[in-house]
Amino acid sequence: MKATALDHLVIAARTLAEGRAWLEGRLGVALSPGGEHLQFGTHNALLSLGPEAYLEVIAINPDAPTPSRLRWFGLDTPELRERLEDGPVLIHWVAGVAALPPSPEVLELSRGENRWALTVPADGTLPGGGVQPSLIVWHTPPPPTRLPDVGVRLASLRLGTPDPDRLRTWLDALDFAGEVEVYEAPQPELGAMLETPQGLVTL
């Protein structure tokens, strides 16, 4: 069975245009169009991190109807909305698994031709404050197989948490394979270093 591995990083922004401009300015490469998530009233743009992983910039879609449930990735929480007033931020990561157990948190989702299953808490909050990954299973070829390779790679992902042993145990139970540094911090925090054509960039 394939080991659990990084699927994608999630950067949130007040608007998709703001998020794209911020990330493209930092990385010096263009993002690819994503699409709309009708169930959550959001939309995104994408960036390849190589053949196995990618990055998404996500924001509330002002032209979409208000969803019937709380939006994913904490986008409806006052705490995240306040954070985004200072600009886009890396808020979460998603790990790809071979299978998901039956659970009310597992949702079957789609965007265009893409089909996948994802763990989404009913209250829309970020698991572990963002440092514990959501889990995904793709039913169609994942985005990295279709995104242009612009030469950006993830060099490291750092996860700070008040309970690092618990997070390490959780990742070990998933059989997670990847370069992730878990460390103790007063509150959940994420950081990523990306290799780009212009050098290393820290998010």
Image (cartoon, grey):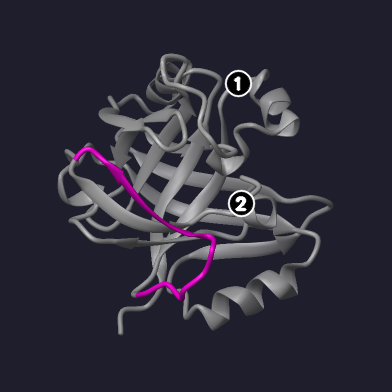
Residue type, mark 1 in image: Gly
Q: Nearer the viewer, mark 1 or mark 2?
A: 2
Q: Taking 45 as reference, is 61 above or below it?
A: above
Q: Is residue 89 above or below residue 149?
A: above
Residue 189 position within the rendered picture, expressed as x and y whole percent measured from the top left: 69, 47
Q: Is residue 128 left or right of residue 195?
A: right
Q: Position of residue 108 (x, y in %)?
A: 36, 55
**Where is mark 2, residue-wise?**
122
Could you classify mark 1 by the number of other residues whose Cα lies within 10 Å: few (under 14), some (14-19), or many (20 or more)?
A: some
Would you name the residue on which mark 1 appears?
A: 87
Question: Residue 114 shows which numbered tag?
Answer: none
Residue at 32%, 35% in the rendered image: 46
Q: Residue 110 colored magenta? A: yes
Q: Nearer the viewer, residue 74 or 13?
A: 74
In the image shown, does 152 or 132 lie closer to the viewer?
Answer: 132
Q: Secondary structure at mark 1?
A: loop
Quadrant of the rendering where the C terminus is positioned: top right
Separation of disc 1 and disc 2 at Cα?
26 Å
Let me know if residue 111 is in the magenta part: yes
Foreground of the two, 64 or 142: 64
Question: Of the residues under marks 1 and 2, which one precedes in the sequence?
Answer: 1
Q: Is residue 21 above or below residue 101?
A: above
Which residues are drawn in magenta? 99-112
Disc 2 marks a residue whose amino acid type is Ala
